[in-house]
Amino acid sequence: MLPWSIDWAGRLEQKTYDSALLRGNPLGDPHERPVLVYLPPGYDESDQRYPVVYVTMGYTGHLGMFFNRMAFRQPYPELLDAMFAAGDVPPAIVVFVDTWTRLGGSQSLDSPGAGQYLSYVCDEIVPWVDASYRTIADRDHRAMTGKSSGGYTAMVMPLMRPDVFGALATHAGDASFELSYRSDFPRIARILRDKYDSDIQNFLKDAAGRAGRLQNEDIELYEIYGVSSAFSAEPDGTVLLPFDDLGEVIPEVWERWLALDPVEMLKQPQYADAARSLRAIWIDAGRSDEYYLDLGATAFHRGLQAIGVPDEKVHFELFDGKHGLIEYRYPLAVRWLCEQFQ
């Protein structure tokens, strides 16, 4: 009974996956990971096969947070269940995957600084889901979705692995790095100078001793280091920040970041080919996004147009809102994707 719980029309299964690819990862994070699988109403009574929508979380997110319950709001899995229970949406299996690290996230990439999270999703979780559930096991019935850093994953994973994913939905995904990341560098450089002698390793040591007592400023420092561990780690795992003690970009490191910017990736032939091969692309963001990810979303949309992705394959929308509290939009994208799968 609301607000404490609902009577499910479908059902959830939470499994633990023992990953060979994450075993021995550079950060010493768990190689056994929870996987949440939503099975739509009617799954147990039929022999039907279903398309699959995968979901990743934003930075600092992990799987347990999908169950967070706030006043006057329902968690995403419950919103999905209500949508499918209405009976006017083609059903799908929805899989929530966890690519968390002790730094707050991995951008779901393969990196010597964090681990093989892209391969974990594409080469372990997807085949396991197809073997364990009645899926339509082809890329044209498989989508990646997410918000913020999860929205970044939703953009780049299908570009990097179009053999696995044929559709995506990105909600305020990280893009246009010159706008969304670079403007923060001078401010972060000041924090590091004033508190940690311009050495982020000093911060990491200090923060480790303050577990459970971190401030917003600490989360920002974790994030810049965590994203650097995904974008600009050396082969030996050494993490390089993209700016110096004055907050000015280090060109050779910054170029490594830009090479992973979804907007810039579309300019590369292999990624342009992958984008043109996608079956459906949903892009949205709030017009007042604090990180200018509405501008990134617009740039990604224009990039798709520039390489010839037909407009009928793309849903692009800017809505009134900021970066947070947009979970109500997730089922809208899943509904649209399910309709495109037909």
Image: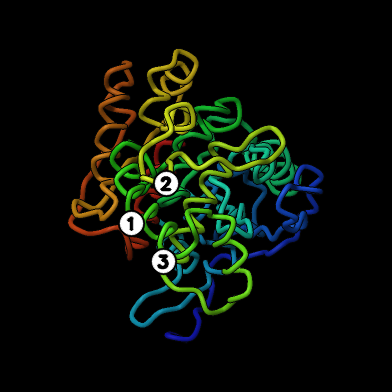
Q: Earlier in the sequence, mark 3 or mark 2?
A: 3
Using a 10 Å C-alpha cutoff, classify the residue at mark 1 as few (fewer than 14 neighbours), some (14 to 19) or many (20 or more): some
Q: Nearer the viewer, residue 3 or 106?
A: 106
Q: What's the CA distance linking mark 3 and mark 1?
A: 28 Å
Q: What's the CA distance linking mark 2 and mark 1?
A: 39 Å
Looking at the image, residue 85 lies above or below residue 21:
below
User: Which mark lies nearer to you, 3 or 1?
Assistant: 3
The residue that disc 2 covers is 245
Tell me the kind of residue under disc 1.
Answer: Arg
Please give the name of the residue rendered at 40% of the width and 62% of the height, measured from the top-left corner. 194
The single residue placed furthest to the top in the displayed view is 269
Q: Earlier in the sequence, mark 2 or mark 1?
A: 2
Using a 10 Å C-alpha cutoff, classify the residue at mark 2 as few (fewer than 14 neighbours), some (14 to 19) or many (20 or more): some
Q: How many marks?
A: 3
Position of the C terminus, as image quadrant, is: top left
The label number, if any, that marks residue 217 in the structure image:
3
| Residue 39 seen by the camera | no
Name the secondary structure under disc 1: helix
Tell me the kind of residue under disc 3.
Answer: Glu
The label number, if any, that marks residue 329 in the structure image:
1
Looking at the image, residue 74 lies above or below residue 315:
below
Q: What's the CA distance linking mark 3 and mark 2?
A: 17 Å
Classify residue 289 as left or right of residue 169: left
Using a 10 Å C-alpha cutoff, classify the residue at mark 3 as few (fewer than 14 neighbours), some (14 to 19) or many (20 or more): few
Name the secondary structure under disc 3: helix
